[in-house]
Amino acid sequence: MHYRTIALSHYPTMQRIGIDFTSAVRERAGIGRYARELIRALARLDRKNRYVLLVPRDAHAELLHFDWPPNFKIVRAPLTERYLAALWHKFRVPLFVEMFTGAVDVFYAPGFLLPPTRARRAIVTIHDLSYVRLPECFPAPLVTYLNRQVPHALKRADIILADADSTRRDVNDVYGVPLEKIKTLYSGVDPRFNPIVSPESRARVRDLARGKPYLLSVSTIQPRKNYARLIEAFARLLKSQIPNSNLQLIISGARGWMFDDVFQTVERLNLRERVIFPDFVADDDLPALYVDATLFVYPSLYEGFGLPVAEALACGAPVVCSNASSLPEVAGDAALYFDPRDVDALVDAMQRALADEVLRSDLRARGFAQAQKFSWDNAARELRDYLIRE
């Protein structure tokens, strides 16, 4: 994996850069986490250019906490996120971001949509096209909204950033955007995701898991994550000859949408005592949750990147992973793969990993090496290059 850099002599003297930081102060996981990690890494890297982070009036204050350097400024718009979205994207009122940020040379939106801007250049990140590839996994109004708004952002952007090569190809295939306009910018793994965790964090995870071994999956609960099939596979696994009859399944993630089928599957298979839904696990405890997992299982039907897989690899969890979309890019040769629509294939992969300690050790070793390819500092360096090049 090669990261591109530009010689410092090619940089202009100073750029004023606006960033839509809305998702970072709205969502703890997903795109919000991506935006926070990436822009915080950018703040550590670039002390020369001037940055204005635009947030809505109702931004979650605790998600803004960071030791921002003097060249980074937070600006609150006088309107809530809902009103800004309605004005900018539903009605397309030309309320330019510069009314809040002041004049900027470049404007970057890390979450699919570009607000109106007078900046000389605009950049947007498209994380995935799951709403196109799997519209049945989303509420219909959201699909309609994204189908209307994303093409508008793609047309206005000078550079489009994609989370993985698979997403880059999707944007080219679905919307006909030339590949040279789309750049792959991989996510990173925070250094706190490693096998060394505090005894206190480990104790809290042990309490969560009731002191028993567990399979782990981490992501928002929604149809695209394919959790109903994972629970079905887990039920079949428990009926087979597995090493430990106390095995549990932990699915850590907030409830997203259209999740009733997941909980109905638990009830139908009488797995209430075996499947644990801890909702959102504190960031401080998430590494320990990965470290102590017997297996990390990720059955997603489609991913733009798949950050939990990279984090699991960095923590030394043996990974059993869907072979869909970007996931082979992220896990490389450090995972056992399966077709996410084939429950039998998922059962076989889990059985194979559970039965073979040597295989699990090999996956751990390969995982550490693979995770080293993903760094927020490298991602921020690439982003900086795109933001400030002429």
Image (cartoon, helix red, strand yellow):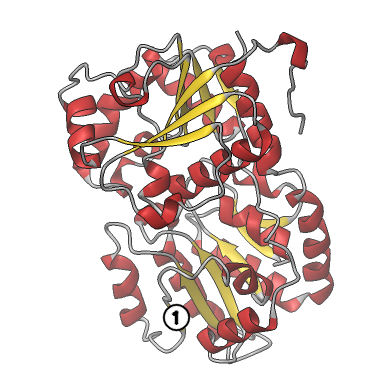
Horizontal and vertical percent position of residue 271: 40, 84
Horizontal and vertical percent position of residue 63: 43, 53
Q: Which amino acid type corresponds to the residue marked 1 in the rendered image?
A: Val
Q: Which residue is mark 1?
A: 275
Q: Is residue 338 visible?
A: no
Location of residue 234 with respect to 322 vertically, above or below: below
Quadrant hosting residue 389: top right
Q: Is residue 261 visible?
A: yes
Secondary element type, mark 1: strand
| Residue at 36 percent of width and 34 percent of height | 132
143 left or right of 282? left
Horizontal and vertical percent position of residue 328: 65, 45
Count of number-bearing discs = 1
| Residue at 58 percent of width and 39 percent of height | 69
Closer-to-camera residue (81/273): 81
| Residue at 65 percent of width and 89 percent of height | 244
214 left or right of 250? right
Quadrant hosting residue 385: top right
| Residue at 30 percent of width and 19 percent of height | 116
Location of residue 275 with respect to 31 vertically, above or below: below
Name the outermost residue toward the front. 70
Q: Which quarter shows the C terminus?
A: top right
63 left or right of 187? left
Location of residue 210 with respect to 250 vertically, above or below: below
Horizontal and vertical percent position of residue 318: 71, 66
The crowd level at tag 1 (other Cα within 10 Å; few <14, some 14-19, many 20+) is many
